[in-house]
């Protein structure tokens, strides 16, 4: 029986995101199924294996059991960083510092031959799991090879977009962003500009979310100036 059959036969739904659902599978493993054929799970799994081989904290994957729309990966124990904020188990600025450390560590992992490093391009508190072994990074569907400034720009613009919005966690997002940019030297002008362009082009963005990007970029620039003046 194939994976799809096993999940359809009773695999428990563990969670859902904008583009995918995660199901319980064998002991210690989960299956993430992309909805409507979105993404390439096999390519994502290959990136995860690449960075794991370089010592980066990501779940193991079973590429042989995965398909273009379904990724079988190790089940992690622990809350997301976002959930830990809500439970009072981690402070927002501490979380921003952890994101910064994860970005720096990732950018030591070489890419695939074009002189760049591996970029996650969606590193934010809901994509970090706080396990007993430390923080682990999930959701590598946007990963590619490139320059670190773009990765810093994407994380910053995602956080700032929430920080300038109307959601109850806006203040929290601003604190996380402040922690991320405690040392703003890794964020480049080119990286921030390209991050905003890519964020605006994402099909899952609502019109209101796109409208907030200008204000989000202004917030990032103001926080960078504050840090430089200290």
Image (cartoon, helix red, strand yellow):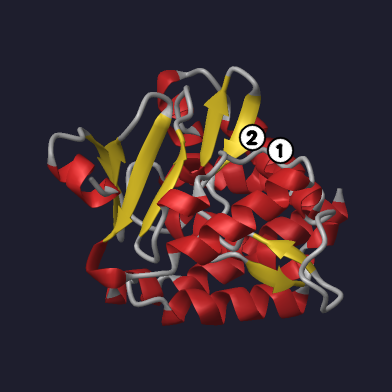
Q: Is residue 155 left or right of residue 113?
A: left
Residue at 40% from the left image edge and 69% from the top image edge: 39
Whole-percent x and y of residue 14? Answer: 27, 35
Q: Nearer the viewer, residue 171 or 8?
A: 8
The reply to whether residue 39 is in sight is yes
* Position in image of residue 136 (x %, y %): 60, 36
Q: Is residue 150 above or below residue 64?
A: below
User: Residue 179 in the image: x percent, y percent?
Assistant: 68, 41
Residue, disc 1: 97
**As drawn, is 5 to the left or to the right of 75?**
left
Nearer-the-camera pick, 8 or 158: 8
- Number of residues whose C-alpha sits closer than 10 Å to that of mark 2, classed few (under 14), some (14–19) or many (20 or more): many
Q: Quadrant of the N terminus?
A: top left
> Residue, x 77% and y 40% (percent of image)?
55
Q: Which structural element holds mark 1?
A: helix
- Looking at the rendering, which quadrant does residue 109 occupy? bottom right
Taking the spot 48% from the left edge, 74% from the top edge, the residue there is 199
Marks 2 and 1: which is nearer the front?
Answer: 1
Identify the mark at residue 93; answer none if there is no mark: 2
In the visual, does 155 lie left or right of 161?
right
User: Which image quarter: residue 28?
Assistant: top left
Question: Callout 1: few (<14), some (14-19), or many (20+) C-alpha neighbours within 10 Å?
Answer: some
* Residues at circles 2 and 1 in contact by the CB criterion of under 8 Å: yes
- Residue 155 seen from this side: no
Q: Give residue 145's mark.
A: none
């Amino acid at each position: 029986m194939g994976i799809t059959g096993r999940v359809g036969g009773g695999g428990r739904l563990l969670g859902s995101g904008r583009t995918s659902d995660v199901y319980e599978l064998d002991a210690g493993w989960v299956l993430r199924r992309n909805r409507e054929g979105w993404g390439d799970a096999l390519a994502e799994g290959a990136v995860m294996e690449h960075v794991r081989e370089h010592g980066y904290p990501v779940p193991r994957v079973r590429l042989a059991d995965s398909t273009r729309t379904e990724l079988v990966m190790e089940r992690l124990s622990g809350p997301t960083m976002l959930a830990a904020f809500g439970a009072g188990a981690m402070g927002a600025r501490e979380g921003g510092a952890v994101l910064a450390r994860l970005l720096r560590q990732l950018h030591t992992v070489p890419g695939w031959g074009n002189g760049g490093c591996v970029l996650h391009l969606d590193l934010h508190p809901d994509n970090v799991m706080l396990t007993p072994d430390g923080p682990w990074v999930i959701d590598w569907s946007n990963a590619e090879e490139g320059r670190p400034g773009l990765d810093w720009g994407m994380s910053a613009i995602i956080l700032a977009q929430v920080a300038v919005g109307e959601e109850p966690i806006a203040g929290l997002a601003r604190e996380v962003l402040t922690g991320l940019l405690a040392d703003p030297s890794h964020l480049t002008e080119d990286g921030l500009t390209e991050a905003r362009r890519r964020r605006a082009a994402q099909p899952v963005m609502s019109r209101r979310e796109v409208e907030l990007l200008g204000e989000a970029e202004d917030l990032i620039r103001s926080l960078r100036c504050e840090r430089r003046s200290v």
